[in-house]
Image: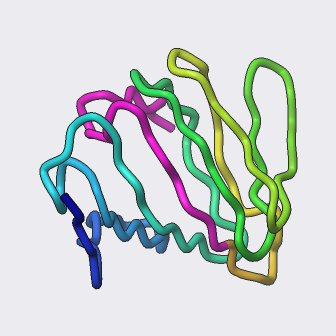
Amino acid sequence: MLHKVEHGSIFPREDGKIIDEHFGALHSKHDGFSLAHMLAPAAWREPAQVADFDEVVIVVRGVLAVEAEGEHLEVAPGETCLVERGTRVTYSNASQGEECEYWSLCMPAFRPERTKIDVL
């Protein structure tokens, strides 16, 4: 069976980041995985979080900064990064002046209740 997605569903956010889910709990009701197109504005930064899923990010444009367990990586266009479930991680746009575009694949699917976010 084939499933084509012409456009996804936007997860509501207040920090300027756009999460456009093509497959997952919100848009297609899949729970085994989710796939979302992300647009992070310049200088964007999320609070640290611990997820109950593995997450692979694939950067298309810009540079995504990933901090976890004392490590700091910068993921550039064409590069990928795996963050294993149970890892305390912080994502941010490494650029103060340019948007960062990337895709996120989560297994099992992203759900808010599967993510514990640090309160600032």
When asked about the image quadrant of residue 96, the answer is bottom right
Q: Pinpoint residue 48: horizontal percent, then vertical percent.
A: 57, 34
When asked about the image quadrant of residue 61, the answer is bottom right
Residue 64 drawn above or below residue 115 = below
Residue at 60% over, 19% down: 87
Its colouring scheme is: rainbow
Q: Pinpoint residue 14: horizontal percent, then vertical percent.
A: 37, 67
Q: Pinpoint residue 91: horizontal percent, then vertical percent.
A: 65, 47
Q: Pinpoint residue 78: horizontal percent, then vertical percent.
A: 80, 64
Along the viewing direction, whichever of 114 and 79 lies nearer the viewer: 79
Along the viewing direction, whichever of 45 and 101 lies nearer the viewer: 101
Q: In the displayed orientation, state which residue is furthest to the left.
A: 29
Judged left or right of residue 25, residue 101 is right
* Count of numbered marks: 0
Stretch in magenta: 101-120
When asked about the image quadrant of residue 21, the answer is bottom left
Along the viewing direction, whichever of 52 and 45 lies nearer the viewer: 52
Query: Would you say residue 29 sits in the magenta stretch?
Result: no
Judged left or right of residue 66, residue 119 is left
Judged left or right of residue 97, residue 9 is left
Residue 62 drawn above or below residue 64 = below
Q: Quadrant of the N terminus?
A: bottom left
Judged left or right of residue 60, residue 21 is left
Residue at 63% over, 50% down: 57
Residue at 71% over, 72% down: 60
Query: Would you say residue 116 sits in the magenta stretch?
Result: yes
Q: In the displayed orientation, state which residue is furthest to the front.
A: 1
Residue at 86% over, 36% down: 72
